[in-house]
Image: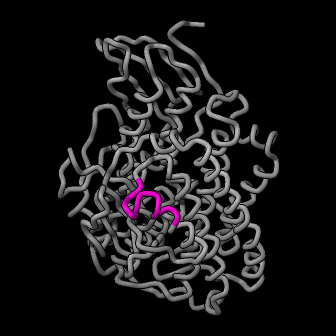
Amino acid sequence: MDKRRIFISPVTRIEGHANITIELDDEGNVSDALFHVNEFRGFEKFCEGRMYTEMPTITPRICGICPTSHTLASVKACEMIQGTQPTYTANLLRRLMHIGQNLSSHALSFFHLSSPDFLLGYDSDPAKRNILGIAEKFPDIAVKGIRLRKFGQELSERITGKKIHIMGIVPGGMAYPLTEENRKALLQWIPEATQTVQLGLSIIKRFHEENADMVKSFAPSPTLYLGTVGSNGEHELYDGKLRFMDADGTILNDQLSPTDYLNYIAERSVNWSYLKYPYYKPYGFDKGFYRVGPLARLNVASKMRTPLAQKEFEIFKSMNGGKPVHGTFYFHYTRLIEALSDVEDAERILNDPQVTSLHIQHHGRWNYEEGIGSSEAPRGTLFHHYKTDATGKLVKVNLLIATGQNNPSMNRSILEVAKQYVKGDDIKEGMLNRVESAIRCYDPCLSCSTHAIGQMPMVVELKNKKGELIRRIERG
């Protein structure tokens, strides 16, 4: 085996592919760490020239994990172009599909990608530190996690006939109704889904108790936060206004229309990644880094919409005396609080007497040249921005993806974790896994944020101050 290269299998447990470079000073301590995303971004460009009405069909193909979020942001932009609004029942069905996708994604992140670290250990055999290892040692947990994800997917499939790359969310509403038979079938899932999310909560809370020092010291740098909230500050995923909060918990901006996002968010390119560095415009590039996603959403929210999730939310809020919780590891906990809210909200919607109504679409036509839509994807706030000519053809498309907005913080987090665990030039597999774990906290969707063409394995390179390569570790 080459002393400079170590091959580790399996492939990294994230959605997409990336590189990490860690640099050391003369004393062998970490001085810098960079998170590279080398997949090409080009989705916006090849959408130019298409009719705006095609976008709710095209954009779900960006990602197999969060197609509903892309569809909703896209269709909202189209509805702004038309000047139309969905019907009441259409909003119920859209919300149901959206929380189903959120639940499915969170189940995948926690039970498939992250639980091997919590249940098997960060330094356990990497050949078994995956969902197959969980299935071997904790078969009941593995099955429950798989079924929770299945329930989330069925919330789409029972309405539109598709689990991923969904169809049927159209400008003005929905193309398909929910039948009474499918409504009853979905309701039967609720007790099991609630129990499984509560199992996940017990796993992560037990890990917190047994590893308190590690959890608190794991990439704890303060940032700003962005999330969508309702009119009373309640946690919101489907439709609401934007709230920015600073590191001390002061609300910087509240009830901002997503259509004004460019007044508050700017992006800057970096020379080591195709993934840009977004930042909060009023604070500038150096001080304006912010985070999105479940941790950010719970930090900015004033309350949850559902009772069981509200109880967990109150525990979360008490962790830092009511101020924002900054520790990156708490993404896992907040992800599960959201999953609990998803199940409760699904039950509420399924019991709404109008959910099976056939009044599911308003019709419209092109009226305006510009449309902006947003939704809360599992990984955070998502924006779709379209400009058209007078025929309705797209002349410009901008997609601001949640993972891209977390990019500056992901870089900071891997630097903090590398400084904590990497000493000298001796890289062990457990160290690689801990650095990876910092990325997994964010549950990044790299193909989503860069719209992947091709693949790139994860690589950790260790360099000295002169830039000379000391050691290289690859996955994949």
**Could you say which quadrant of the image residue 132 lies in?**
top right
Specify how the rendered protein is coloured.
one colour
Q: State the residue at coordinates (58%, 54%).
A: 64
* Quadrant housing the N terminus: top right
Rendering quarter of residue 341: bottom right
Q: Nearer the viewer, residue 59 or 301?
A: 301
Q: Which secondary structure type mostly characterizes the magenta part of the structure?
A: loop
- Does the image show residue 444? no
Left or right of residue 105: residue 415: left
- Tell me which segment is drawn in magenta: 315-325
Residue 71 in the image, given as x and y percentages of width and height? 49, 66
Query: Is 366 part of what is drawn in magenta?
Result: no
Q: Answer whether residue 322 is magenta in the image.
A: yes
Q: Picture coordinates of residue 61 (x, y %)?
A: 53, 56
Side of 370 relative to 20 (left or right): left
* 278, above or below 312, in the image: above
Give the quadrant of the C terminus: top right
Left or right: where 382 falls relative to 204: left
Residue at screen point 53% across, 26% down: 431
Q: Residue at x 50, y 31 (%)?
A: 456
Residue 93: percent from left, percent from top: 58, 79
* Image label count: 0
Residue at the extreme top of the image, as rendered:
2
- Looking at the rendering, which quadrant does residue 467 occupy? top left
Nearer to us in this view, 221 or 35: 221
Q: Is residue 4 left or right of residue 399?
A: right
Residue 26: horizontal and vertical position, in percent?
A: 31, 12
Residue at position x 63%, y 87% from top? Answer: 355
Q: Is residue 44 visible?
A: yes
